[in-house]
Amino acid sequence: MIKELLQEKYKCLFTPQIIFRGRDYFVKGKVAELYKDQDTESYMAKVEGSDYGVFYDVQVILEDNNVKMSCTCPCIENCKHEYATLMAIDANKYTTIKLLPIPENEKININDFIDSIPEGKIKKYLKKSFAEEEYVNEEKFKKYFSCYLPEKSREYFYNTLFNNFQLDIVDINEFLDMARSSLENGKYKYTFIITSSIIDAAKESGYCDDEEIILNSYNKIGMFIRIAYRKGNDELKEEIQKWIQKYEEKNYYDDIFLEDMIIGIK
């Protein structure tokens, strides 16, 4: 079915150049990871980009003979990573697993993103970047100014992290960087949404019971939440208290490291 749709219906969603490059990416094995939800026609993939070692997250949902796609790359139009993923799906290059649905991730309009950043901060960043490198790295730029990116929901963070923990595709530094940037810019509630989602997804997926990655991040996560609690308004304080109470009621304090982190918040 997918092969037929690739040849006919789906091809109209891509430019000829994107189709050519997407096919090349598939042939070269750049679709590093591909998983299918056991209950739906929902797929998640990690696709390597042009820069070695840089991967983008692709989601494909096939419903009623239609396709929904998203990719974390900066391309505004349907991209080569998405086409390469469709080809991998067609070739049955996936592993079946239980996944949570990811809310649709709107592509970032890079021009709107840049317009939202104060000019003075961009000038300061450019001077620093050109002093250290010969060019401006787009991923580093987005990471540095992540607090100006459109905010995502708790569901987005939790489901994305839960799936990544389930698939053992774990790099929480991106989320911690976003939390730190939000904290430094006074977005205390957003800081809490990100950091609490890391803990919730890791704990409820069973990942943090035996993984050093989460254990080594407890101090930083606890510090971020502690500052958000101290600096936030009464509504946020109450939300954080309810979050702590949830762990008390579920007896999650059998994890002494998690207990130590939470006790230090207030």
Image (cartoon, rainbow, N blue to C red):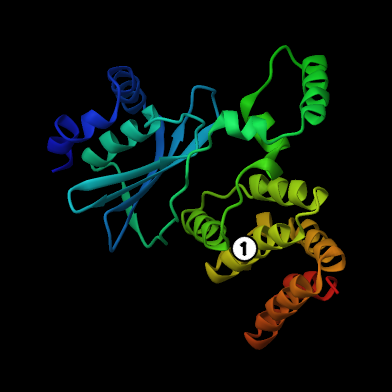
**Which amino acid does the dot numbered 1 rest on?**
Ser
Residue in the image at 26% along x and 54% along y: 41
Instruction: Look at the image and tell me in which quarter the C terminus lies.
Output: bottom right
Relative to residue 92, is residue 139 drawn left or right? Answer: right
Q: Is residue 106 above or below residue 257?
A: above
121 vs 166: above or below:
above
Residue at the spot 80% in from the left edge and 74% down from the top edge: 234
As rendered, which of 236 and 35 lies closer to the eye? 236
Q: Could you tell me residue 116's position as x and y percent?
A: 68, 36
Farthest residue in the top direction? Answer: 134
Q: Secondary structure at mark 1?
A: helix
Is 247 on the left-hand or right-hand side of 71?
right
- Residue in the foreground of this view, choosing between 122 and 41: 122
Where is residue 118, by image quadrant? top right
Quarter of the figure with residue 242: bottom right
Q: Residue at x 65, y 50 (%)?
A: 175
Neighbours of disc 1 within 10 Å: few (<14), some (14-19), many (20+): many
Taking the view exactly as shown, the residue that stands out farthest to the bottom is 249
Task: Say above or below: 199 vs 235.
Answer: above
Residue receiving disc 1: 197
Image label count? 1
In the rendered image, the quadrant that contains the N terminus is top left
Image location of residue 27, percent across then percent down:
31, 24
Residue 122, given in percent of the width and then of the height, sits at: 76, 27
**Residue ID at (82%, 68%):** 229
Q: Residue 32, position in %: x, y? A: 42, 37
